[in-house]
Amino acid sequence: MTRSIPLGVYAPLPAFFNDQDETDVAKPGVVPVVSATMGEAAHLDFQERIQLIQALRSALNENGLHGTPIVAGVGATSTRETISLAKDAAAAGAEFVLVIAPSYYASTLKANPTAIKRFFIDVASKSPVPVVIYNFPMVAGGIDLSSDDVVDIAWAAPNICGIMLSCGNIGKVSRITSLLDGSFKILAGFIDFLLPAVSIGSAGAISPLPNIAPEFAMELWRATQSLDSATDWSKARRLQEIASLAEAELLKGGVAGLKYLLHHRFGYSATPRLPLQPLSEDAVPICLITHS
């Protein structure tokens, strides 16, 4: 049986480049995701992707977090390279791989949905660890899997254990959960709709917010798991409102904004890889969280 991804909040870890252009890994996070969009996956070479996984696995183990899984992005422009990355990510210590649709020939693939579905099925059949689909049209050339596409892929590829819906379509959460059993997990692609998503079957969310406020993110998650009274709902709704506003401000700054905030809080490098530019002081997002 394919291993299920855990319930909860996922943190896409940034990759930090120093003046010698080497990579490092941020703190472990909630459920850590490496080499995703906020991790500048498009700017990493093969060796750097593997280095990030190895460094993170080592840090987790050294801190007694042997059971904390790693989700590693393995997106590439071809099926062959994606499979190769999946195999190497697994060997480096990743328990799950995150696969986005290849975007270089996006217009051709969008005209042939069968080819897109075949891509995910082929990758899953060769990956030594479970696959999580990463549906993020904004960075995949507009490729946006429909609910029917996801269900078809899941039925044909048992090694696919879930999907991150960064398309922001909450209706897909409901439709997919109604058609697939509970072993296939659906994660909201942003924390700003975690509460409504959980109410219709979501297993959690991925967000850059836990990099800044992990305790708050987990407080929100726990609140969504205990909704037995009107008071519980009121608390969860209040926390959700704070999270939604904070994440919206954080996303305005993008990769550079997240790195800027982490630099000022932890001293990490604030410099993204070119052609991305560091955030200027007058463009700093307002994402300070206050909650009782």
Image (tube, helix red, strand yellow):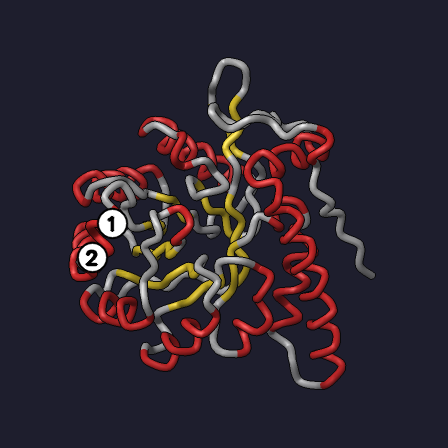
Measured from the top left, where is residue 10 in percent x and y? 52, 54
Q: Nearer the viewer, residue 123 or 29?
A: 123
Measured from the top left, where is residue 266 in percent x and y? 68, 32
What residue is pinned by disc 1? 107
Residue under the point 64% across and 46% down: 250
Identify the element where label 1 is drawn: helix
Residue reaching furthest to the top: 20
Callout 2: few (<14), some (14-19), or many (20+) C-alpha neighbours within 10 Å?
few
Identify the element where label 2 is drawn: loop
Q: Which mark is residue 94?
A: none
Q: CA separation, marks 2 and 1?
A: 6 Å
Measured from the top left, where is residue 56 in percent x and y? 47, 37
**Amino acid bearing label 2:** Ala
Please determine whether, in this image, residue 144 is positioned above or below residue 41. below
Q: Is residue 87 left or right of residue 47?
A: left
Residue under the point 25% across and 40% down: 77
Q: Nearer the viewer, residue 82 or 115?
A: 115
2 and 1 marks in contact (CB < 8 Å): yes
**Amino acid bearing label 1:** Ser
Q: Which mark is residue 111?
A: 2
Residue under the point 31% across and 40% down: 89
Quarter of the rendering occupied by the N terminus: bottom left
Q: Nearer the viewer, residue 52 or 235?
A: 235
Please determine whether, in this image, residue 128 is positioned above or below residue 160. above
Q: Is residue 279 left or right of residue 167?
A: right
Residue under the point 73% across and 85% down: 230
Give the quadrant of residue 165. bottom left
Callout 1: few (<14), some (14-19), or many (20+) C-alpha neighbours within 10 Å?
few
